[in-house]
Image: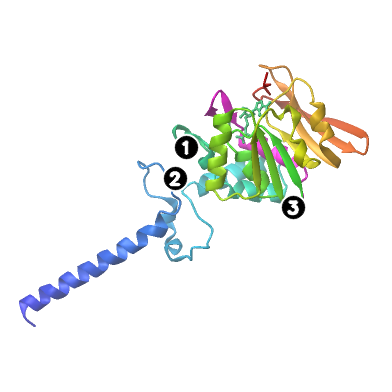
Amino acid sequence: MSARCKWRMRWTGLILALGMLVSCAGPLRQGGTAPPSAGPTEEMAQPSLTLAPTSAPVMDRYQKDRQMMIESQIQGRGVKDEDVLRAMAKVPRHEFVPPEYLHEAYADHPLPIGYGQTISQPYIVAVMTELLRLRSTDKVLEIGTGSGYQAAILAEIVQEVYSVEIIEPLYLQAKERLERLGYKNIHLKCGDGYYGWEEHAPYDAIIVTCAPDHIPQPLVNQLADGGRMVIPVGPPGSYQVLWLVERQGDKIKTERIMGVAFVPLTRKH
Ligand code: SAH
């Protein structure tokens, strides 16, 4: 074989190898939201992912952090509801925090989301969701959409989620985020959640993620017979008590669960 022919074969081999590398880059980038400065991703440690069909669950670089969060903060502290554990293992919490807090997305505390508001601590999200004893056919109302994280957890478990947020920019951000993540069973409204969302009542469950200083009567009225509500109640700027409220016909049963610290429920004047 001539020297020229050998060179041609080597070049062809090199071009083929480069072509294969480029075609692997698509699926490897599926996680999508990693900060550009980050090192090797979780996906890279799992080569089978590059060959997976597009319908395979999207693995992201926070998969391990999420699993650790479930084991140590949630299961480790006694949350047992399988649906809650499954939802929290699935929803990408890092998509719901501002970019400067990405590295703390799965940490054991609340995080700022702007406008003086916070995304709740993962454990509190889990406990409140478990207390609701949700079924797949339920319709749930949330007061205080914030980042939309709690709404996404609920939407993984129940049929329809309605959520009200009073701060318009947060409402708009959550709407964009939840649409981008593909949630079709979450319905958002900007307004004062003290009045609930009458139009879609009654609700099988209501979750309030900001603290009023008393239980709003409109929310009790919008609870279905047999329905459950979890709500932190206490004076603004202080600690509150988390209550479980259950409606049985005309009877309302309340149970004190634990001390919590939520941002206040504010009113539109
Ligand atoms: N559930 C949210 C965290 C909520 S923080 C999450 O998963 O990220 C509490 C939210 O309640 C804030 O966004 C705050 O703006 C909102 N809020 C306060 N008062 C409200 C009211 N009257 N009606 C609706 N939302 C209210």
Which of the 4 image quadrants contains residue 123?
Answer: top right
Q: Looking at the image, which is closer to me, 57 or 248?
A: 248
Local SS, label 3: loop
74 part of magenta stretch: no
Q: Name the amino acid type tagged 3.
A: Ser
Distance from Cα at disc 2 to Cα at disc 1: 9 Å
Q: Quadrant of the C terminus?
A: top right
Q: Nearer the viewer, mark 1 or mark 3?
A: 3
Mark 2 and 1 residues: CB-CB less than 8 Å, in contact?
yes
Q: Secondary structure beneath disc 1? A: helix
- Circle 1 packing at 10 Å, graded few (<14), some (14-19), many (20+), is some
10 Å crowding of disc 2: few (<14), some (14-19), many (20+): some
Q: What stretch is highlighted in magenta?
A: 111-136
Q: How far apart are marks 1 and 3 (CA)?
A: 31 Å
Which residue is more in the foreground, 116 or 69? 116
Question: Disc 3 designates what residue?
Answer: 136
- Which numbered tag is attached to residue 102? 1
Residue 127, picture quadrant: top right
Q: Quadrant of ligand 1?
A: top right
Does 155 sit left or right of 138 as displayed? Answer: left
* Quadrant of image for the N terminus: bottom left
Residue at disc 3, CB closer than 8 Å to ligand 1: no
Q: Which residue is drawn at 79% across and 25% down?
A: 215
Q: Is residue 217 left or right of residue 207?
A: right
Q: Which residue is drawn at 70% across and 20% down?
A: 239
Residue 89 image position (x, y, % from top left)? 60, 49
Q: Mark 2 or mark 1, which has the lower sequence index?
A: 2
> Which residue is under mark 2?
33
Q: Distance between the Cα atoms at labels 2 and 3?
A: 30 Å
Q: Residue at x 76, y 39 (%)?
A: 199
